[in-house]
């Protein structure tokens, strides 16, 4: 009974942590506007692209792989969409952005699943490769996105009084949770991450699953790029370049094991919101960007330590 209780408590650490961090900043920053509706709304809106990327990373980590290229995919997708929208309109632009994300995810997946290269090394290489592509795509200049239809649908618009970014988050979380928990594909992802050899013996096509999760991660990173460019009404090569640590922290803190076999879409959402509250609170407290990176680094270390310790039990 004590062991079962401890395991259950470990699954809910992210929720306790989120509440604790929120209460801490609410008390410490009660005179700094932390609890204002505008500030809390900004936290949710700012974390929307991170949450979208976190969903893809849950699938990737659950399958026993990792994707370090998501930040670069965001930039390439946003710039591809912005450039195409300038010349050809919204629909081709959206297809270009999503297509760029899926294509990079496909390339990563082929190298991981069929060439059998380690996903860490593959995505580390493509992270640098496509960061360079993003810089050369527009010669380091930002591209404005002025189409009202695009910015309204992917960033600054609203439906029934709810911002479109929140709608995207709700739809992605709902779809991701159902696929992860209620479909054969989700079960196969977990089986591959838990024991790839046993999964293969049981008839699961392990390479197909690995390719699929890498493409899913790339496609969702591409969607995050569209959300960034829609909200900011511009695309630039720097979009997404600092998100990797935040996404990894959100996913691991949210209960996804680093070595695969277990994960949580809802946990990733709460982890993303926790990182958003943390960043916002640290900014209001006057901490610099470097201090925020240090804090996130400690959080990742703690979460990885817990994840690996639990996997070894």
Image: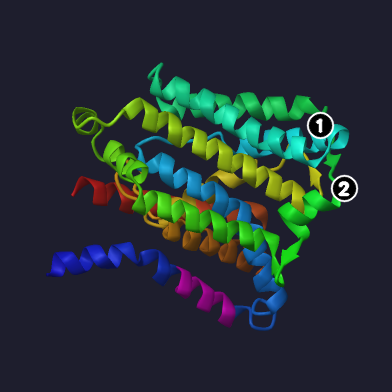
Residue designated by label 2:
146
Q: How is the image coloured?
A: rainbow
Residue at position x 61%, y 27% in the image: 128
Q: Quadrant of the rendered structure where residue 152 is?
A: bottom right
- Residue 204: % across, % down: 27, 31
Secondary structure character of the magenta stretch overall: helix
Q: Secondary structure at mark 1?
A: loop
Residue at position x 65%, y 70% in the image: 285
- Image height check: is 127 above or below 162? above
Residue 207 visible in the displayed image? yes
Give me the C-alpha separation between circle 2 and circle 1. Answer: 19 Å
Residue lying farthest left?
A: 1
Dot 2 or dot 1, earlier in sequence = 1
- Image height check: is 135 above or below 61? above
Residue at position x 46%, y 56% in the image: 268
Q: Is residue 75 left or right of residue 64?
A: right
- Residue 295: % across, % down: 53, 57
Q: Is residue 285 left or right of residue 255?
A: right
- Image height check: is 140 above or below 221? above
Q: Secondary structure at mark 2?
A: loop
Residue at position x 43%, y 55% in the image: 177
Task: Answer few, some or many: residues within 10 Å of disc 1's Cα (few below 14, many 20 plus, some between 14 and 19).
Answer: few
Q: Is residue 181 left or right of residue 247?
A: left
- Residue 110: % across, % down: 46, 21
Residue designated by label 1:
140
Q: Which residues are magenta?
A: 18-27
């Amino acid at each position: 009974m004590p062991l079962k209780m401890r395991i259950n408590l470990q699954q809910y650490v992210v929720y306790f942590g989120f509440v604790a961090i929120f209460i801490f900043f609410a008390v410490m920053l009660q005179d700094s506007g932390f609890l204002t509706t505008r500030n809390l709304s900004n936290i949710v809106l700012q974390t929307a692209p991170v949450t979208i990327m976190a969903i893809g990373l849950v699938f990737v980590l659950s399958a026993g792989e990792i994707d370090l290229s998501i930040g670069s995919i965001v930039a390439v997708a946003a710039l591809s969409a912005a450039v195409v929208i300038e010349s050809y309109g919204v629909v081709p632009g959206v297809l270009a952005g999503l297509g760029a994300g899926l294509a990079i995810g496909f390339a990563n997946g082929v190298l991981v699943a069929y060439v059998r290269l380690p996903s860490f090394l593959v995505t580390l290489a493509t992270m640098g490769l496509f960061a360079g592509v993003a810089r050369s795509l527009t010669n380091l200049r930002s591209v404005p996105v002025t189409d009202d239809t695009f910015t309204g649908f992917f960033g600054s618009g609203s439906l029934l009084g709810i911002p479109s970014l929140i709608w995207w988050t709700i739809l992605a979380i709902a779809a991701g949770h159902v696929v992860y928990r209620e479909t054969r594909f989700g079960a196969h992802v977990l089986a591959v991450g838990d024991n790839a050899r046993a999964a293969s013996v049981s008839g699961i096509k392990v390479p197909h699953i690995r390719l699929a999760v890498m493409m899913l991660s790339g496609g969702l990173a591409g969607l995050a790029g569209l959300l960034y460019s829609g909200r900011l009404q511009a695309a630039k090569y720097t979009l997404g370049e600092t998100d990797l640590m935040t996404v990894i922290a959100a996913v691991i803190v949210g209960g996804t094991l680093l070595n695969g076999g277990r994960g949580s879409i809802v946990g990733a959402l709460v982890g993303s919101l926790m990182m958003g509250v943390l960043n916002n609170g640290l900014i209001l407290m006057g901490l610099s960007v470097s201090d925020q990176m240090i804090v996130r680094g400690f959080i990742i270390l703690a979460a990885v330590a817990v994840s690996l310790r639990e996997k070894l039990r």
